[in-house]
Amino acid sequence: MKAPTRILIVEDESIVAFNLQQRLMQLGYDVPHVAVSGQESLDLVSQSQPDLVLMDIHIEGEMDGIEVAARLNESHPVPVIYLTAYSEDSTLERARRTRPYGYLIKPFSERELHATIQMALERHEVEEALAENRRLLQQALDAASMGILDMDTTTSAMTITGRAAHLLGQPAEQPLALSDFLAGIDEKDRAAVATRFQEVLTPLKQFSEEFRLMVAEKPARWIKIDASALNNQRLSGIVQDISARKHAEIRLKRLNEGLENLVSERTHELRESLKELETFSYSVAHDLRSPIRSIAGLSALMLEEHRADLGEDGVKLITRISAKSTQMGNLIDALLNLSKLSRVALQMSEVDISEFATDIATQLMETEPERAADVRIAPDMKSRGDPVLVRNVLDNLLRNAWKFCAKTDITRIEVGKLLQNGNEVFFVRDNGCGFDMAFVDQLFGPFHRLHSETEFKGTGIGLSVVQRIVVRHGGRVWVQAAVDKGATFFFTLAPDPAA
């Protein structure tokens, strides 16, 4: 009895991973391990030798899922199916370079998951069979002649022997005119083979061609002839039946086309769903503006006209209502700005990172001229991107650095760049309060804050804006920090060429 297919799940969200593991086990698959990071994935593949890997693209650690798949292709080739919520063209292009066996856009149905896994396994089986057939064929060709074809180029008369005559459906050891040989070739390929013969006969060159024969059997029989010149008058080579390989290639091509169509359909569906969700979010946030502003206005009016009647406790309560309504208004404005990021088309051009950073830093220092600050910005930092959005990234990162350095004796901020895997990486470093890296996964989520509102004001949306803009440019953003030792935010504006 054949053992169940063994699958490794690479997913850093435990609830999603557990749900996926249970669904797969109910379908009859063996799912002994779940990995959450790139290094753990590589280790588990090496140890357990799974039949297939379900790979989320955004996972814990320095490597994302696409980088892990690329490494697996080099060290432990195993079919990889991407399971992700990301469908940007840049992400799809990076993923395509790793030659995946599938690409499912979350959310997906159990039926789609099962069908994609089965197609991937079948494709992998076909590829392995194809590789084995090629190996055996090469051994046979090395060990013995599989059929010989000779041609006198002065008369165009051919002589075929042994297995070659049987494959071509012609009498052995008898002269065969080129016209008779061509007549036995399928009409779809006949003209191309005839043209090829004319090209190699004058002057005499090496001949190699694959074609179908005129036979009633189905599927069609494919033949390959490899021949080279023995002298100025003779062309000699071998004839072989390549039907198994050609039909495997055709089958594999159809499987690949099916996978591409499935990815295209799911991507289109996801984009439509995202468009509807963004429109809904925008409408809700926009409609909430009016009542929130009314609450803020009425609170201010009550304080102005009825302060004496409210008493001390009443004034405190109304003041809190006013402050909270103002905070809610700021959050709604931030949410509207976040939703707009996906609706605006990128206007790509050269952007001057140094100029943007200098302008923003100057504005920050002018708002607090009494603060001691040492801001250093590397010169001539340029890249390609949308000028408005790239400036937005720098604005959020520099304002964050300025804000979280407020309690230091001297505010120190550095903006620079470095090379990593041949890619330009920009960074914003500060000596502020920093944070515990154990909570780094929460950092780029909308409205997630690692410090209380009383310590540092803000909406908690800035880093979400940064991440969304960077991802739209095909790059990524990450951070290194420690409590009371500042933070360094790194970002790229292009895909990593080493990925």
Image (cartoon, rainbow, N blue to C red):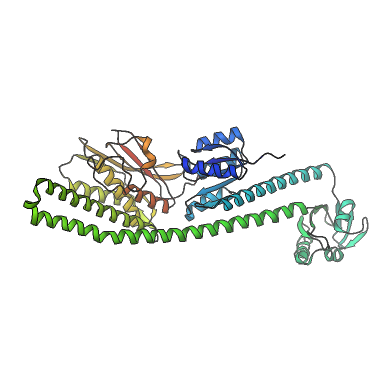
Quadrant location of the N terminus in the rendered image? top right
Q: What residue is rendered at 6% in x and 51% in y?
A: 308
* 483 vs 358: above or below: above
Q: Quadrant of residue 219?
A: bottom right
Residue 238: horizontal and vertical position, in percent? 82, 51
Q: Is residue 244 shown left or right of residue 61? A: right
In the foreground, 174 or 202: 174
Q: What residue is rendered at 78% in x and 62% in y?
A: 197
Q: Which residue reaches farthest left?
A: 308
Number of numbered discs: 0
Residue 179: horizontal and vertical position, in percent? 85, 66
Q: What residue is rendered at 25% in x and 38% in y?
A: 412
Q: Which residue reaches farthest right?
A: 174
Q: Is residue 124 shown left or right of residue 457? A: right
Residue 343 can be seen, yes or no: no
Q: Quadrant of residue 296?
A: bottom left
